[in-house]
Image: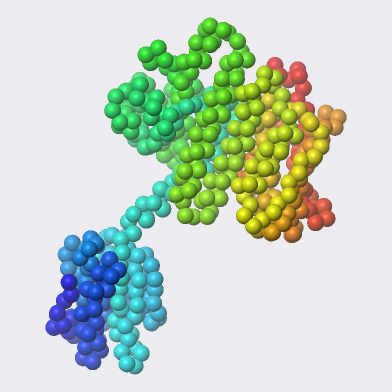
Amino acid sequence: MAETEHSIRDLCLAHTDLMIPDIMILENMVNQLPVIATLTGTDIFIDALTVNQEDAIVLAWASSPNSPSLYRNSVVGELAYAACEPAVYQAFSTGQSFYNIRGVSQEGVPIAQTVVPLTNDNGQVIGVLIMEKDISKEIRQEQQVQLLSQTAEHLSHTLMSLRVTGYGWEEWLGNGVFILNDKGKIVYANKQAMCISKSLYEGDTLDGNLMLLLSFVSLPEMMEGLKNPRNYEFDNASYLFQAHPLLTGGEFNGCVLSFQDVTELRQKERQLGMQNIIIQEINHRVKNTLQNVISLLRLQMRRSKWKAVRREFTATINRILSIAKVYEIFTYQYRDLVNLHDLAEYILEQVVQSYILPEQKVKTMVQGQAVLIHASQAVPVALVLNELVANSLEHGIKADAHGEISIIVRESDANINVEVRDSGCRLWDYAAISKGGTLGLYIVKLLICEQLGGTFQFENCGQSVVANISFPVHKKEETG
């Protein structure tokens, strides 16, 4: 639709300082609005600056017959305030065009505006041509990505805190993962959780009341009751439940409720009483669950368009992959020792493949002795190697065409020494990085210095940066 020339002229004379020749130019533009609206599938407007030289008045409007309009009623004759539509005011002030500038419509809808100035024969701006599109969906997606990024970061901190405080992964990671909001409503369930939940209650998984099923009346009560793993029996099946809080900006935002089908495990405990079989079963389930978490993160990462978010997802995935590799080793062996040389080879290859560009050539090498470390040291050391290799790629090699990363493993006296060396084309300021408070280096310092009782330092060696870690050999009498 488009307003008549007479109404445009009346509006201009009543609300603007435009002269008749300038008004006629705007009147001639009106007939083109329906064509532009149909072509772009958007709402098209002509606005003119009011006498206060700040706000604008809508002179004409056209919408596409093939796409829903942003407006239920005509907005011709209404004011467009500078605070709500900054692109319009900027176009009048500067005489420049502005593209996809965010604002709010007269009806409160988030919009992206493209604004082009309309000038007279003297080059003076007499009005603006505006194209508006609804970006409500984009705003919701951005909010979801932000929430997911915060959740991924929190999960990473949660996984770390569990290991540092002495919790085993088998104590909370299971085949089923639910995410509940602060009202206790299920907002996400992975594939395994959906399958298992069908045996727990009828109906849609997301409509189920887990608090009622687990005999809790409120979310805080459930958080307290499932702070530690708790066994439940349903129809001759055993499940191990545990809840962990999700915090955003220090505020409680819901929880992750994980549960594991331990029916076979309980049967083996009763029937066999074989500790090694139980441990292997747990390790196998932990490895599978970590793969489920990785699959979820990868799925969400592919849906993100932001490089920064994808980079954080990659870092989190690599951390979990390093842990999963350790539990894969535990699954297929009875002894509680891990070959550090083999573990370093896997982590180095995995992290390099996930970070480098197709045109880059990064040479990798693991040297030294076939050192064996105790199972209790394997996960912390795997995480540390992951962070140090990622550090070398991000700050040493970066986007260089060629580079080399090597890991050297040695055992001397009562200590195990590991050296991670990169030989990128530039020296990076490791001191600044160390003081930057990054999560990666926080993990390294926390695990090596506090959990393993070792030391960690960076140093420049020629054209290379070397990270040295050292920690005591695990004594047999310490196994308890």
Q: Can residue 15 be seen in this view?
A: no
Q: In which quarter of the image is residue 162?
A: top right
Q: Position of residue 283 (x, y in %)?
A: 58, 24
The foreground one among 22 and 392 is: 392
Q: Position of residue 222 (x, y in %)?
A: 40, 26
**Figure colour scheme:** rainbow
In the shown orientation, is residue 235 left or right of residue 453? Answer: left
Q: Where is residue 40 in the image (x, y as percent from the top left)?
A: 30, 68
Residue drawn at x 60%, y 15% as measured from the top left: 277
As drawn, 353 above or below 101: above
Q: Where is residue 33 in the image (x, y as percent from the top left)?
A: 24, 76
Residue drawn at x 37%, y 25% as measured from the top left: 197
Q: Quadrant of residue 445?
A: top right
Quarter in which the N terminus is drawn: bottom left
Q: Give the farthest residue toward the right.
A: 413
Residue drawn at x 82%, y 52% as measured from the top left: 461
In the shown orientation, is residue 476 left or right of residue 146? Answer: right
Q: Can residue 259 be seen in this view?
A: yes
As drawn, 275 above or below 418: above
Quarter in which the C terminus is drawn: top right
Residue drawn at x 36%, y 34% as measured from the top left: 186
